[in-house]
Amino acid sequence: MNQEHEGKHYLVVGASSGIGESIALELAALGANVTMMARRTEKMEAIRNRYEFVILFDVENGNPNGDPDAGNMPRVDPETGYGLVTDVCLKRKIRNYVETVKEGEEGYRIYIKDNVPLNRSDLEAYKHLGIDEKNVKEAKKKDENLDIKVRDFMCRNFYDIRTFGAVMTTFVKGALNCGQVRGPVQLGFARSIDPIMSQEVTITRVAITTEADAEKKGTEMGRKYIVPYGLYRAEGYVSANLARKTTGFSEEDLELLWQAILNMFELDHSAARGKMAVRELIIFKHDSELGNAPAYKLFDLVKVSHRESVAVPRTYSDYIVDVDEAHLPSGVSCIRK
């Protein structure tokens, strides 16, 4: 590891972005004590408020989240018939959106992505610190803060690690790992407001696969599964405490998260998923880091029901969304997007 800057003090101005930010982060990674100055402090400071949020999204004539163990049918709670969408599916949409709108921008890379082995990304941290993967154990003996430096490098460079956390212990045998990060943003499964009816639709294709098949038939048959209509509700949490202690998730990161949630289906349309859209994002903001009320009490304030005149909901307008803001606990505000 380069020892030239270790223990020295540096003052870096314009450190919220661009060259200034890169220099400050490079010096910090090399063990220097860095004081950062900038006008845009919202990018440098971790969030200071706890949040809970509710996402309402719907699907029309599509499969919101296929179950590979059930022939890719829409996920359903077998006891109740309510539709399910996993947290993994929702986080994938958020990751895809961030990667698209922040393409190539420093600090907004995506760790969990297609065709990129996790080991390759993990190794970048050690290369950045000038450590050979074969000598990790020796390096850790020389620098007791090495694990923290590696973790911080990953959090700074990968938005999804800074947001959702990650388990980065892939090089177990060589002791080369980037640790485990518990992210400040957590999502639960989404569940439909009403039971859903999964339909199997038979389709025909005029393009025949092989020459032999073409001599026998003029079309081929296929199947796809759809939900005619379903309104889903997902709930999530943002911990300012974890953001401050671990990942440095900032106010700018938070605004990007809200933007990504609201638009997570807009850049990801496909025939299989039909028409999907986020209809509303309801955010509860606490005026403190640790919060002012239990999350369940805030979630209970959001009531979604279909209109009395509607027997079978088929559009978002068939539902009524009510937030009982009159009973918000002290120190909590509500934002509807």
Image (tube, rainbow, N blue to C red):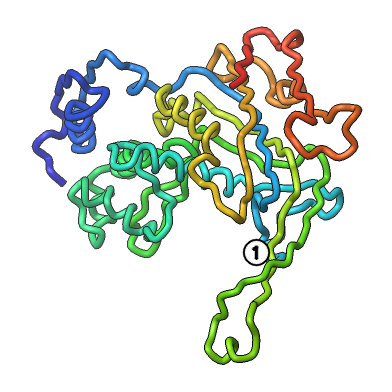
User: Can you say whether 30 is above or below 323 in the image?
Assistant: below
User: Can you say whether 70 is above or below 195 in the image?
Assistant: below
Q: Position of residue 283 (x, y in %)?
A: 61, 22
Label 1 neighbour load within 10 Å: few <14, some 14-19, many 20+: few
Measuring 56% from the left and 75% from the top, which residue is drawn there? 207
Indicate the secondary structure of the residue bearing disc 1.
helix
Position of 65 with respect to 209 (left or right) is right
Check disc 1 and report the residue beneath it: 68
- Which residue reaches farthest left? 4
Q: Which of the pair 267/216 is nearer the observer?
A: 216
* Amino acid type at mark 1: Pro
User: Can you say whether 330 is above or below 60 in the image?
Assistant: above
Which quadrant, please, contains the C terminus? top right
Q: Which of the pair 142/321 is nearer the observer?
A: 321
Position of 96 with respect to 315 (left or right) is left
Q: Which of the pair 13/262 is nearer the observer?
A: 262
Measuring 51% from the left and 28% from the top, which residue is drawn there? 258
Measuring 29% from the left and 37% from the top, which residue is drawn there? 105
Residue 303, image quadrant: top right
Q: Is residue 145 visible?
A: no
Measuring 62% from the left and 72% from the top, which residue is drawn there? 205
